Structure formats: structure tokens, C-alpha cells
Image (spheres, rainbow, N blue to C red):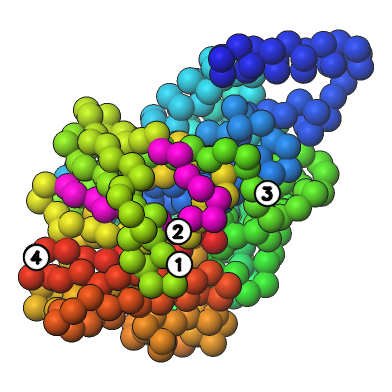
Amino acid sequence: MRAILRGALFVLLAVCQAISGGHTSAAERRLPIVFVHGNGDTAALWITTLWRFESNGYPRELLYAVDLHYPQARSVNDRPQAGRSSAADVMGQLSETVDSVRKKTGAERVVLVGQSRGGNTIRNYLKNGGGAKHVEAVVLCGAVNHGVIISDQHLIGSEFNGASAFMKDLNSTPDEVVPQVRFMTIRSDNNDKFAQPDGRLIGLRNVATGLGYEAPELKGATNVVLAGVDHRETGYGPRAFAAMYRFITGSEPGTVNIIREGQVELVGKVSGFEAGAPTNIGITGAAVTVYRASPITGERLGSPVHRSATGADGRWGPMRAEHDAHYEFVLEVPGYPVTHIYRSPFLRSSDILHLRPQVLGKDDAAAGAVIYLSRPRGYFGAGRDSVLLGGSLPPGIPAGVPTVSSVKRTFPADTQHSVIGKFNDEEITARTWPMHDNHVTVIELTY
């Protein structure tokens, strides 16, 4: 049915173009958009961005998020490293994805949107992978377009070093962009941990990076500055969505809110880690059990609403979800702790609701119970944000530029406790689970 609807959609677009004499705006053409996540991340981080596009009438069939197999960059780009990828590796996967999307949709050209390292991948594909002829527009969000440091002493051989051969090649043209492709960059004013004049936030205190707050900008691009946003919010936040929608379509979005869908279906993938680095390769034999949870206490409300075991592709689901329901996802993966993930209600469907087990941190095993508060689409800013875990500000959130997306607190194991995790307007109640049984809790923020 989806294939029939997709075909009908493109027939309709072709008819409209013929009637108008072949001249249509970007908004009318509705080009496919391929979203490329950042270093160590997954396609799942684009969920709310995709929902905002859908809420403004952009067809779901034209929105694609690539899931890079080995998302974390090598320490030295041209030196093999287990569990990590070179710039050429991820460029090749992006190229395959664009070819697949063009074949599925019948579109000659696509739009690419990249976050952080995703910007390197997109620029490499356009300049060195033959991608320019397949791409109409590019949006780079918090991209490390000039590296995170320019140095002959630090990060030697890394693709994130502005002095590397890789980065010099990307920036070798006078305008730093590729002809015939429209470019936009989105950056923070001064709140991006990877665009700072001092290397303190990348572990190089009192070392000058040779860069400034404007490092994500490119000559020849439309460069947009969003005040106060952090590194991840340059791509995954509502203000970033408004900027990219305006650039891609040529019109203002009707809303930056996510409009509730009539019927919600969720599908995803379970992945893990290799050689200490996260992967997006599906795990066989993982068990996913989902309970509806009380928004007040976090306790389970009845029997499981979903159970599934992953096959060779690591996929779980499909699961029908209720708009007003909070959920506990119990993830059981051999070799990892049993992970209890508590989530807010889902307003729309998604096929990229990916799950990874929580890796235990230092001293976790000796604790009675541990709860992590995770914000995948942004960082926690002390003073900027209201962040509470168990009624107080959790430890590990430094003042100044937001730099951490996951914090934790420990609790006694004598009995189960209800613990509230709060970030600004999003509030989720979870339950503690005993570490002596190899269980850990994650409160995962969505919005």
C-alpha cells in the first residue's frame, strides 16, 4: 500500500509540474530529505525533527534518516580501529543511502541535513564521492566545518583537526562550498562545546584551538546563528527545525510543535557496542518488553503491552502506542545489564525508535540502584535549564557552556523507589531497580 501511495504522490507532483510549465518551487517539489546524525549517535535522534516536518505536511515517505553502522570516528582517520569508522567509510554508506532513496522516490536530487560529524560526511560525499550531482541543498547543523582545533600537536590525524589533510581538502575551494548546491549552516552564538577558542571543553585546558565561535560557518553559505542553543540543539531543537524548514522549502513552517497523529505505531532496532564504541548494527536475540507506566509513580499498569525478540537485523516491533501513555521499555541483551528505559508519551509513529542497553559507569556495580537521566537531542545547561533528578540538581552538570547529555544518581536498594526526572517542561517518573540483579534505570527525554 505504501508503495502505491508513494507512486501516486510522484505522479501527482509530475502532473502539477507539467501544468505549471515545469516551474515549481522547492516547497512544491517536496524533495526527499536525508538526515545524517553525528559522532557516536543514531538515526533515532532525528525523531522529533521528522515529526515536525510531518506536522507541517511534509510527506513521511520523503523523510529518511541514515543509521551509520560504526558512527564513531577513528582516532586517526587513516588508521584502522575496531568499532570505529573512517571518513571514507561513512561517506560510502551515505552514498549508498542517497542512491537507495533516489531509486525509491524517483527523485533526481535530494536534500541533505547533517549534525556535527554528519557535516563532514556530507561535505566529503559532495566533494569527493560524486554526490554534488544528486544533491540540491545542504543544511549543516553545528558541523565541525573547520575542525574542533587547528593543531600540529593535538588530535594528530583526526578528521576533527582543522590542520588535517582531510579538513584542508574540504575547505580548499575559495567559497568552501560546492558549486550548484545551496548551503546553509546553523550554529550557536557561543554555546557550542566544539566551537570554542580554548580547548578546555575537548580535554585540552589552556590550549588555544585556533578557532572561534563562528567555526561552523562556511564561506559561500547562508550562515544562521541561534542564540543560546548548545551543540546538539543546532540540529535537533525546534528553532533549528524552523531555520532548516525555511531554507529547504522557501516558506515559514506553520508550527514548530509536534501535531498528534491519529494512530501511533513504533518500530526500532536494538544495537550495542564494539571495542567500547557504540554501533548501529542490529543485535540478534535481544528481548524488548514494554509496559504502560504510571506517570505519577512509574509503576507498571498491568501486563506487558508489547513483547518481541530481535532477529538477524536487530529490529523490534511493531508496537501500537497510546497518545497519553508513559512507557517502560525493558531491554534484555546478552552481555549487558537489563536496562529499564522510561519514556514520555509518543505523539506520532516512528520506525527509528532505536534502543541501546546502558553501559555501567564507574562505581555503578557497587551502588544499590542507579538511575541515568539522558537527553540525546541536547545537553544539560546549569542555570539555563531546569534539571531535577529525584528532587534535586544531579551532580556532573558544569556551569557555563552545556557539555553533558547524561547524568546519574544512586539510590539504596532496600526497596523500590519512585524517582522523577525533569528537564524544563518534560517530566518522567521511573522506578529504581537493584544493581545486585544487574538492572539499571534510564529516564530518556524525548522533547
Asked whether, in this view, residue 435 is left or right of residue 425, the answer is left
* Amino acid, disc 3: Ile
Helix, strand or loop at mark 4 = helix
Residue at (15% x, 71% y) in the render: 434
Quick check: 279 above or below 149?
A: above
Which is more foreground, mark 4 or mark 2?
2
Q: Which residue is mark 4?
A: 437
Residue at (22% x, 28% y) in the render: 312
Image position, residue 141 (x, y; %): 57, 54
Q: Which residue is mark 2?
A: 326
- Determine whether label 4 and label 3 are within 8 Å by CB: no
Q: Is residue 193 in the magenta section?
A: no
Query: The magenta stretch spans which residues?
Result: 319-333
Helix, strand or loop at mark 1 = loop
- Determine whether label 2 and label 3 are within 8 Å by CB: no
Can you say which quadrant of the picture contains the C terminus?
bottom right
User: Which comes before the other along the chain, label 2 or label 3?
Assistant: 3
Q: Is disc 2 surrounded by few (<14), some (14 to 19) or many (20+) residues within 10 Å? A: many
Q: Which residue is mark 1?
A: 295
